[in-house]
Image: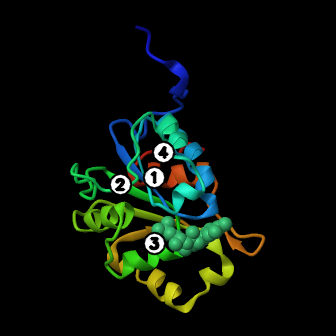
Amino acid sequence: MKKNQDHQVDRIGDQLEGKTIALAITGGIAAIETPKIARHLRRYGATVNAYMTPSALKFVGRASLEWATERSVVVELSGLAEHICKEDMVVVAPATMNTINKIFNGVADNNVTSLVASALGSDIPVYLAPTMHESLYNNPFFKKNLSQAEEYGITLVEPRGGEGKAKMPLTETLVNEVIKYFGGEDGS
Ligand SMILES: Cc1cc2nc3c(=O)[nH]c(=O)nc-3n(C[C@H](O)[C@H](O)[C@H](O)COP(=O)(O)O)c2cc1C
């Protein structure tokens, strides 16, 4: 039987060949951009595993991520122990205020926060793309937590500004950050 070509992406580089990226999606409106991010990572050779919080599922469908990654999507923890990080990097995008504050308080109460907890305990790089209204971004508890990112080895991907929001970086910018971590020349 012929393989279904519907999921295929055109390769534009091999900088992420052999790398598996956990794309952890939380409940911000920018979650609608994540199928594109997953496919752009794949254009550089990455395998992408998507993890979605229950809130993320309000903004983007599981089927969209299954299609974009060509893999099953983790929406809850099961006997397969999805909370133990086995990927080469975790990218939380969008990263809500709620999830970020939980991460910095050591909370591991869902598939995304427990995945990050495991990654941090295994020296697996964790990238966060904070995305929210500026009133949340300026919240004092949140700002204090973010200021500790470097101390905990967490990398923040700077949001884009505009319209009173901390917005998701452009897909290309985010993917280039991942490529740079693995020592590749960026794809721009
Ligand atoms: C329409 C809508 C848009 C939202 N956008 C954001 C957002 O961009 N960033 C954010 O931090 N929270 C946002 N929230 C709030 C989160 O969904 C809420 O804090 C939720 O508990 C996050 O859960 P999670 O971190 O487990 O995914 C939004 C909520 C709604 C209803």
Inter-mark Cα distance, 2 to 3: 17 Å
Closer to us: 73 or 49: 73
Disc 3: which residue = 99
**Residue 178 numbered mark, or none:** 1
* Label whose residue precedes the other's in the sequence (4 or 3): 3
Give the amino acid type for the residue marked by disc 1 in the picture.
Answer: Val
* Label whose residue precedes the other's in the sequence (3 or 1): 3
Inter-mark Cα distance, 3 to 1: 21 Å
The answer to whether 105 is drawn above or below residue 13 in the figure is: below
Residue 123 lies left or right of residue 71; in this view the side is: left
The answer to whether 139 is drawn above or below residue 170 in the figure is: below
Q: Depth-wise, is mark 2 or mark 1 nearer the camera?
A: 2
Q: How is the image coloured?
A: rainbow
Q: Quadrant of ligand 1?
A: bottom right
Residue 107 lies left or right of residue 98; in this view the side is: left
Q: Residues within 10 Å of mark 3 (few under 14, many from 20)?
A: many
Q: Residues within 10 Å of mark 2 (few under 14, many from 20)?
A: many
* Label whose residue precedes the other's in the sequence (2 or 4): 2
**Residue 89 numbered mark, or none:** 2
Q: Residues within 10 Å of mark 4 (few under 14, many from 20)?
A: few
Residue 26 percent location from the top left of the image: 50, 62
Give the amino acid type for the residue marked by disc 4 in the picture.
Answer: Glu
Give the amino acid type for the residue marked by disc 2 in the picture.
Answer: Met
